[in-house]
Image (cartoon, grey):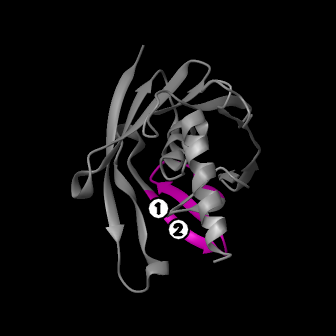
Amino acid sequence: MQRHTYALEHWEERSGDRLSWRFGYRGTAGEFGRIEVVYPARRHGDRHVTEVSGDTVPATSFSGWAYGRKPSLHMAQLSVGGSGIRIQRNRWAQTRAGRALRLRVAGREYRYLATGRRHRDRALVRDGVEIRTGRQGSGARKKATFTVLGPADATDLALAAVMVGVNTRNLTRGGAVRAFLNRSLNWLEIFQ
């Protein structure tokens, strides 16, 4: 089975007003060329958008309710190459496999799931291809890594890259509980 590992370097643009700050990852991924992940690329009220662009990857965006700097899975919308993609998930499932995102892109079924208890370890899986993503380091040395198993194409890599710029804590039970408590405390602050 083919195996390739790519790393994208973290970057930040903190000029001007806080609402105009942008973050992301960029670098070169072998034969796929240059790839850049930007979050939040745009803001629409309480919604943030993460975008992926590059030499060969299709333009991909993920929009969801703002959670920190990234969009969350709440009220999520995904677009690949200008086409809207339906996202399904079972938020009440008890296992990581049950909580996985399910999507259908270009006639192919994908699952995006947590592979570990930490929010940094995820995998995008379709028939014959798996892309394991992880975030390592801190500060200026932070990186997003992609370990590609199988004959992946540009769409596979674009989907994995856009999800690095999305808050996916809800894919684990513990992450969902922490996110719920955080949202509840923020909501209670409104009334004080």
Answer yes or no: do the residues labelled 2 and 1 have beta carbons within 8 Å? yes
Magenta segment includes 182: no
Q: Quadrant of residue 10?
A: bottom left
Q: Which residue is pictured at 75% across the width and 52% down the height?
A: 84
- As measured in the structure, the alpha-carbon distance from the residue carrying label 2 to the one carrying label 1 is 5 Å
Counting every numbered tag in the picture gives 2
User: Of helix, strand and loop, which mostly describes the magenta segment?
Assistant: strand
Question: On residue 152, which mark appears?
Answer: none
- Residue 179 coordinates in the image, percent (x, y): 58, 50
Residue of label 2 = 41
Confirm whether residue 172 shows in the render. no
* Residue 40 is inside the magenta segment: yes
How packed mark 1 is, by other alpha carbons closer than 10 Å (few <14, some 14-19, many 20 or more), is: many
The quarter holding residue 25 reads bottom left
Residue 139 in view of the camera: yes
Percent across and percent down for residue 109 are 70, 28
Q: Amino acid under label 2?
A: Ala
Left or right, 73 with reference to 38: right
The residue lying at 68 percent from left, 76 percent from top is 191
SS class, disc 2: strand
Question: Seen from this angle, which residue lies furthest top?
Answer: 1
| Secondary element at image label 1 | strand
Amino acid found under the numbered disc labelled 1: Val
Is residue 37 placed above or below 129 in the rendered structure? below
Residue 1: image location, x then y, percent: 42, 13
Query: What residue is shown at x 40% (from left), y 18% (from top)?
Result: 2
Residue under pointer 1: 38
Instruction: Name the spot of residue 175 as percent of width and height, x first.
Output: 55, 41
Q: Which residues are magenta?
A: 37-63
